[in-house]
Amino acid sequence: MNFNETVLSGYLKIFWQFSWPEWLMFSLISNVLLYLFSIGLYLFIDKTCHKSPLQEKDHPVSASDFYLSLFTVICNSLVMLIGVFLWKSGWIELGSTQSIMRIGLEVMALLLFMDLCMYFFHYAAHLPFVYKLIHGKHHEHVSTNYLSLFVLHPFETIGFGLMMLVLLVCYDFSAVSISIYLLINLIWGTIGHLNREFFPSSFDKFFVGTTRFHNQHHLDETKNFGFYTSIWDRVFKTYK
């Protein structure tokens, strides 16, 4: 075991010894910080990016959206606690690899598999009955704002989280790979809900799920169900 593996193992032992009240506090605090990071990133890009807005105005920020976004933070905290329970119960095993190549492959695997899972989950959310009960609130944001990423029905938030936990049960991803993936997921979700294109237009040909790609979904709800990539939309003929 090299130095980095020793350090990582030491951190995991500390987390393993957390009591449930400590996990509850850690989960809430970390998810609040991620929430604030996403808002800060959105506002920073919006102020410094000189590209024209994709739509004329941002969706107005309402009190109901604000409270729902805070409830999404609570739901994300609950998913983390479920993950901790599965880890402590032996259902989730964390790999110890510190190989940069192995970590890169694991992150790519998480991105691709989660993109596929989220494609089908997102497509199912647009079935008329499910859409009316669950997903319609998110699509009130035809244009977006810094809270749009978090304006989700609790079932959506928990559903997305449970899909990832299933992947973690199926394969021993390292704690580093999982952490990198979660950070990319947050940043990608924030960028995807900007009202300005963040990526160069040439990225579309590389199957990247750009800001405009997801903005098109908010304009035309029958297209572009992918998240990180446009691969599955192209495969299943829902790409625009």
Image (cartoon, rainbow, N blue to C red):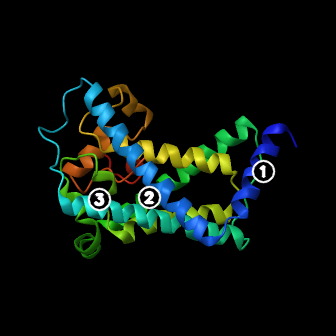
Q: CA distance from mark 3 to mark 2?
A: 17 Å
> Are circles 2 and 1 on residues that touch, CB within 8 Å?
no
| 165 over 141 or under it: above or below | below
Which secondary structure lies at badge 1? helix
Name the image quarter holding the C terminus.
Answer: top left
Q: On the image, numbered disc 2 is attached to which residue? A: 118
Residue found at the far right of this picture: 1
| Dot 2 amino acid type | Met
| 125 over 147 or under it: above or below | below
- The structure residue drawn at horizontal position 32% and vertical position 27%, both measured from the top left corner, is 201
| Dot 1 amino acid type | Gly
Q: CA distance from mark 3 to mark 1?
A: 37 Å
Residue 123: tell me if it is visible.
no
| Dot 3 amino acid type | Val
Q: On the image, numbered disc 3 is attached to which residue? A: 151
Camera-nearest residue between 230 and 125: 125
Which secondary structure lies at badge 3? loop
| Mark 3, other Cα within 10 Å: few <14 / some 14–19 / many ≥20 | many
Residue 174: tell me if it is visible.
yes
Q: Nearer the viewer, mark 3 or mark 1?
A: 1
- The structure residue drawn at horizontal position 24% and vertical position 23%, both measured from the top left corner, is 50
- The structure residue drawn at horizontal position 65% and vertical position 71%, both measured from the top left corner, is 86
Q: On the image, numbered disc 1 is attached to which residue? A: 10
The image quadrant of residue 91 is bottom right
Q: CA distance from mark 2 to mark 1?
A: 34 Å
Q: Position of residue 17 (x, y in %)?
A: 73, 64
Which secondary structure lies at badge 2? helix
